Amino acid sequence: MIDAPGSITAVDGEYATVRMDESGCGRCHEEGGCGGNNIGKMFCSTPRTFRVLNPGQAAVGEQVHVTIADGAVRYGATRAYGLPLLALFVGALGGNALAGEPGAIIGAFGCLLAAWFLLRRTQLRAAQEKRFEPSIRT
């Protein structure tokens, strides 16, 4: 599990709004850390808030850890970056084989558009799956 510290700013039923002071998991200086916290500080200097599941019914003001299941980040990153990139190459190569350079341009844009629709559809489906939803560790 990946977890990051935060503090609860509001509670709404089974969900809580958590203010995250760090931009990543905080493992930047550990072996295998990606340095995402350092990059996040460059682009977002203000704390961010997220609406997450609150199974332990933590109260406003409590310091908590928000967890995300193993594989959830990889799942999202693969689809968000890999699918459009693959679609771009497939469309460009297929279009080039059929109609040369104009076909490559049209094929690349057409497949990128199709990838966008597919990505949107998988995003809506993944939003309904509880296994990818961040929650407060109890």
Image (cartoon, rainbow, N blue to C red):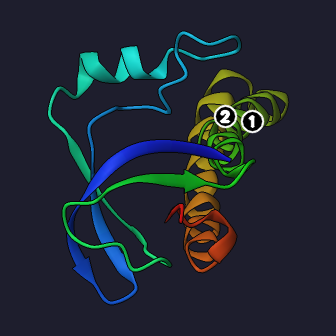
Q: Secondary structure at mark 1?
A: helix
Task: Give the residue drawn at x 38%, y 14%.
Answer: 38
Report the side of 119 relative to 100 (left or right).
Answer: left
Which residue, given by chain and number where applicable, does mark 2 sit on? 88
Query: Circle 2: is it few (<14), some (14-19), or many (20+) Cα within 10 Å?
Result: many
Tell me if residue 28 comes above or below residue 57 in the rendering: above
Task: Give the residue drawn at x 63%, y 49%.
Answer: 76
Distance Cα–Cα, label 1 vs label 2: 5 Å
The location of residue 104, given as percent across then percent down, is 68, 29
Query: Circle 1: is it few (<14), some (14-19), or many (20+) Cα within 10 Å?
Result: some
Task: Give the residue drawn at x 34%, y 24%.
Answer: 40
Mark sitting on residue 18: none
**Label 1 vs label 2, nearer the camera:** 1
Q: Quadrant of residue 81?
A: top right
| Label 1–label 2 contact, CB within 8 A | yes
The location of residue 4, given as percent across then percent down, is 46, 41
Report the side of 26 relative to 105 (left or right).
Answer: left
The location of residue 125, given as percent across then percent down, is 63, 76
Tell me if residue 36 comes above or below residue 91 in the rendering: above
Kind of residue sitting beneath label 1: Leu
The location of residue 29, given as percent across then percent down, is 54, 9
Tell me if residue 76 comes above or below residue 29 in the rendering: below
Q: Nearer the viewer, residue 94 or 38?
A: 38
Q: Quadrant of residue 83?
A: top right
Tell me if residue 89 comes above or below residue 54 in the rendering: above
Which residue, given by chain and number where applicable, does mark 1 sit on? 86
Q: Quadrant of residue 119?
A: bottom right
Q: Secondary structure at mark 2?
A: helix
